[in-house]
Amino acid sequence: MGIIAYSVATLFILKDSNEKFTAAVKEIQQLCESEDYDSAYEKSLSLNEEWEKYEHKVTILVNDEHLRELNISVAKIPSLIERRSDSTLSELETIIHELEHILETEIPTIYNLL
């Protein structure tokens, strides 16, 4: 019974952490789309701080390879925004996709249990 409770609790932690981090990424995405690069840059610096908290929470729950990919993408965002790079939105989408992928692979379904 304890294992089941622990598993459920960790899934809730992962889901909550993913939702909060995804919301922060989407906020930066909207700022970039509206060409408010100064605000987007400031938020991207905060995103790096949030990433450290996120990574610390989920590091024991998630495959390390997924976290490495996200770490690289998150680290790129401030400089991409600062340079007003065309690939900023693409990199933000990559982060969102990776977060969704982490959640999909960690939540038990018939497909990832087989």
Image (cartoon, rainbow, N blue to C red):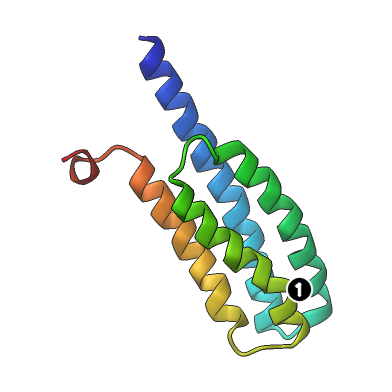
**Quadrant of the frame with the N terminus:** top left
How many tags in the picture? Answer: 1
Q: Which residue lies furthest to the top in this view?
A: 1
Residue nearest the observer in this picture, 71 or 27 = 71
Q: Is residue 54 above or below residue 66?
A: above
The residue positioned 58% from the left and 67% from the top of the image is: 73
Q: Is residue 72 above or below residue 104?
A: below
Left or right of 37 in this view: 63: left
The residue positioned 37% from the left and 42% from the top of the image is: 106
Residue 54 sits in which quadrant? top right
Residue 29 sits in which quadrant? bottom right
Residue nearest the observer in this picture, 92 or 70 = 70
Q: Classify mark 1: helix, strand or loop.
A: helix
Q: Name the residue under label 1.
A: 40
Q: Label 1 sits on what residue type?
A: Ala
Residue nearest the observer in this picture, 13 or 55 = 55
Q: Is residue 73 above or below residue 84?
A: above
Left or right of 90 in this view: 43: right
The 10 Å Cα crowd at callout 1, few under 14, some 14 to 19, many 20 or more, is many
- Residue 36 image offset from top left, x and y in percent: 78, 81
Residue 92 sits in which quadrant? bottom right
The residue positioned 45% from the left and 20% from the top of the image is: 6
The residue positioned 72% from the left and 88% from the top of the image is: 84
**Quadrant of the frame with the C terminus:** top left
Left or right of 45 in this view: 85: left
- Residue 83 image offset from top left, x and y in percent: 75, 87
- Residue 103 image offset from top left, x and y in percent: 42, 47
Q: Is residue 21 above or below residue 74?
A: above
